[in-house]
């Protein structure tokens, strides 16, 4: 949500590959804002990636290739299922391959995404990428707005097609402007 997550992922991939190391990048199949299977930074860099959906079995998809990897990177990780997070956690601990996931914690109503909640539970470490609210405070929440900038307070948890827009807010603005 405009915090630089995809930019950070692309930088990590570049760093590994610059040293001849193999990475695999996955992104959510349901996110086609910049093209299916594309990780895109609003700053410009973009890269093709493999896609995952709720049926993807990461252990099976990676197969014996997992041992050859230097790193596995996942963008839009909030869309992972609980089981997929567990699969990735197992891959990391059994093969020793670092699995780095980038995503957001909660939806536009402040409710956790199931994949994000599981990631927060199992992650060996968590690094927050900071962004700011319009008021200048640290943004930790996401608000869905319509094309006029009016806040939307109901609807499905996932909406990323068309002109759907989100803004980042601090907790104070999230509750005051509700």
Image (cartoon, rainbow, N blue to C red):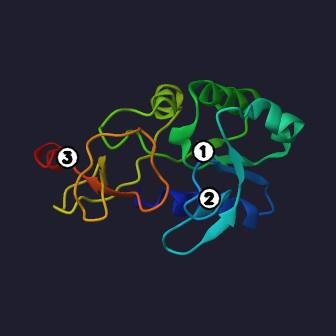
Residue projecting furthest to the right: 64
Q: Position of residue 50 (x, y in %)?
A: 73, 51
Q: Nearer the viewer, residue 74 or 158?
A: 158
Q: Tell me which label, 1 or 3, sits earlier in the chain.
A: 1
Q: Nearer the viewer, residue 101 or 76?
A: 76
Q: Which disc, if any, is residue 174?
A: 3
Asked if the residues shown at circle 1 and circle 2 are in contact, with their CB atoms under 8 angstroms apart, the answer is yes
Judged by depth in the image, the label closer to the viewer, 1 or 3, is: 3
Secondary structure category for the residue under label 1: strand
Query: Local crowd at mark 2 within 10 Å, few (<14), some, or many (≥20)?
Result: some
Q: Is residue 106 left or right of residue 125?
A: left
Q: Nearer the viewer, residue 128 or 3?
A: 3
Q: Which residue is mark 2?
A: 12
Q: Is residue 62 left or right of residue 134?
A: right
Q: For marks 3 and 2, give the CA distance.
A: 31 Å
Q: Tell me which label, 1 or 2, sits earlier in the chain.
A: 2
Q: Tell me which label, 3 or 2, sits earlier in the chain.
A: 2
Q: Residue at x 16, y 50 (%)?
A: 173
Q: For marks 1 and 2, give the CA distance.
A: 9 Å
Secondary structure category for the residue under label 3: helix
Asked if the residues shown at circle 1 and circle 3 are in contact, with their CB atoms under 8 angstroms apart, the answer is no
């Amino acid at each position: 949500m405009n915090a630089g997550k995809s930019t950070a992922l692309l930088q990590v991939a570049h760093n590994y590959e610059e040293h001849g190391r193999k990475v695999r990048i996955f992104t959510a199949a349901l996110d086609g804002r910049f093209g299916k299977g594309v990780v895109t930074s609003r700053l410009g860099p973009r890269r093709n990636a493999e896609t995952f959906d709720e049926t993807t079995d990461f252990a099976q998809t990676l197969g014996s290739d997992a041992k050859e990897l230097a790193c596995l990177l996942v963008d839009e990780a909030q869309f992972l299922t609980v089981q997929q997070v567990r699969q990735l956690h197992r891959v990391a601990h059994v093969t020793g391959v670092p699995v780095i996931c980038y995503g957001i914690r909660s939806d536009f109503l402040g409710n956790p995404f199931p994949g994000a909640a599981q990631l927060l539970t199992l992650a060996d470490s968590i690094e927050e990428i900071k962004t700011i609210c319009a008021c200048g405070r640290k943004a930790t929440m996401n608000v869905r707005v319509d094309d006029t900038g009016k806040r939307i307070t109901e609807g499905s948890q996932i909406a990323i097609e068309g002109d759907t827009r989100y803004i980042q807010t601090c907790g104070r603005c999230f509750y005051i402007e509700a």
